[in-house]
Image (cartoon, rainbow, N blue to C red):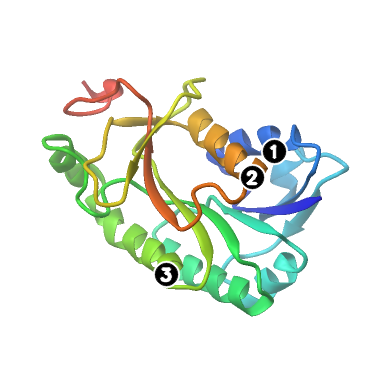
Amino acid sequence: MKHVIIIGANGRSAREIIPRLQEQKDVKLTLFLRQAERVQDIATQDMMVVEGDARDLEGLKAALQGQDMVVNTMGGMDLGDTTETLVRAMTEVNVKRIITINAGGIYNELPEPFNSWDYNMTGETRPVNLKAAEAIENASLDYTILRPVWLTNKPITDFQLTAKGETYKGTETSRASIAQFISEIVASPERHKKENVGISQPNTDGDKPAAYR
């Protein structure tokens, strides 16, 4: 049995991930979030729901006990700090495997003119996300960092990947494709270990996402 904890379990990406992981019969899910009642509509009896704050080191350590893998879906302008706390908690309780959602653009890897447009829209978040990515890469963890761009709720599970250092492809990433990719890694945890990858929906290249054209 694989014990997998989802940090930030009420987010929209997490809500795409949870049902896909439920389908894996060898996965035991723990949902970690600030207010447990928010996941009453998706939590089942075979899941554990833990109410806690990702800024609380001791609370995180308690929740991580016995876990094999962490799926981190947290966001926000404090993401760098909360990620550092999560990394410390994982290190202290010896949990090694993490899949974390970050953001495209933190290395200025988006093609122009999309890169400039994205920076004008969300540039203030780039240092925060970069700090979070570096906290994970600099730790002794078996990580997979995902860098999506403009998120959509389209039911599209196809995705394309770009390695760190490569020019990004696409302008959109469906949450469904993130969930699909994460479910594949959970099924085969050795895949994409120690990788930092851009993930996007194929055939979405352009100056900006379709919703803004």
Q: Earlier in the sequence, mark 2 or mark 3?
A: 3
Q: Residues within 10 Å of mark 1 (few under 14, many from 20)?
A: many
Residue under pointer 3: 135
In this image, 185 relative to 28: left or right? left
**Which residue is rendered at x = 68% and y = 54% of the image?**
5
Residue 22 occupies quadrant: top right
Q: Are marks 1 and 3 in contact (CB under 8 Å)?
A: no
Q: CA distance from mark 1 to mark 3?
A: 26 Å
**Camera-side residue of 28 and 193:** 193
Q: Which mark is residue 186?
A: 2
Q: Position of residue 106 (x, y in %)?
A: 27, 54
- Residue type at mark 2 is Val
- Residue type at mark 3 is Ala
SS at mark 2?
A: helix
Q: Is residue 85 above or below residue 196?
A: below
**Which residue is rendered at x = 28% and y = 31% of the image?**
171
Q: Residue furthest right?
A: 45
